[in-house]
Image (cartoon, rainbow, N blue to C red):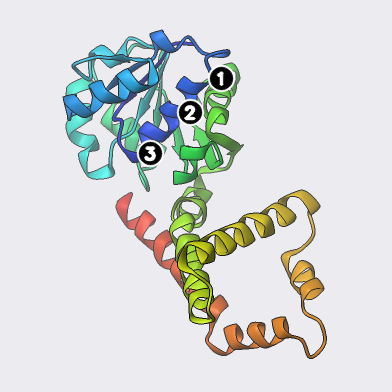
Amino acid sequence: MTISCIGTGAMGGAIMRAVCALTSKFDVSQIKVTDKNAEAGKKFAAENGCTFVATNKEALASKYIFLAVKPQFLGDVFDEIKDAIPADSVVISMAAGVKLEKLQNFAPKARFVRMMPNVCAQIGQAMTAVTKSASVTAEEFAEVKEILSAAGKVEEVPEKLMDCVTAVSGSGPAFVFMFIEALADAAVRCGMPRAQAYTYAAQTVYGSAGMVLQSGTHPAVLKDMVCSPAGTTIEGVAALEKNNFRNAVIEAVTAACDRSIALGK
């Protein structure tokens, strides 16, 4: 599999860094990257063993072309590359909110996979959703998912769920980071040193997430396991409910979903 990536910023860089780390599976020297900031792109290539190319068109000489470009810049990039995309290549877009139909309008002859990863790709723990246009074969789609699995878990979803995915797993880490920060602040308020507070808060979230994924038990059941009658935890749960904790989370995800929909228009 030959792979290129246009853009080595936070998300594109995280995905390609994870792919380059799997030297047993991928020929890293054949992975091409480019970036509008040439110095940043060259530094990325040097650090990860891949090849920097100076132009977006040079990056098209691959079977799988990742497009790590923000939605507002897609038009300019496609104006440059749309007529040079090889017919047998697959373009994988990670632009939030931009539907397959709109991608096809940018480059009518290209074949597309749409993906939504999250920042956890930086540690190989991403939750990535993918969907494809009809012209992409099952074999090609499987290879795209294989590439992306280097950065974490990958699942196919119908395109109508991609805005929801963007809000839950794309934006979700920011909400979780805020919760960890608040949990640590509370620990400091109760007397714990700051550095230790972040460790306790982060490990608690990490372990709790692991229990949900590994046990398959409903989160409400797991919550009830911790809430002893007249105990400390149920008092904290009551305080969260009093302050509309769940509704605040629901509103945050809904707002992010609405923004994803708006970006696609």
| Apparent side of residue 149 relative to residue 86 in the rendered image (left or right) | right
SS label for mark 2 = helix
Which mark, by number, is residue 262?
none
Asked if one can make out residue 24 in the rendered structure from this viewpoint, the answer is yes
Q: Which residue does the numbered mark 2 point to in the structure image?
A: 18
Q: Which residue does the numbered mark 3 point to in the structure image?
A: 11
Depth check, mark 1 against mark 3: the one in front is: 3
Q: Which residue does the numbered mark 1 point to in the structure image?
A: 143
Image point 59% across, 17% down: which residue?
139
| Apparent side of residue 87 relative to residue 126 in the rendered image (left or right) | left
Mark 1 or mark 3: whose residue is earlier in sequence = 3
Mark 3 or mark 2: whose residue is earlier in sequence = 3
| Tag count | 3
Q: Residues within 10 Å of mark 3 (few under 14, many from 20)?
A: many
Residue type at tag 3: Met
Residue 184: x and y, percent?
A: 50, 69
Name which quarter of the figure residue 10 lies in: top left
Image point 62% across, 55% down: which residue?
206
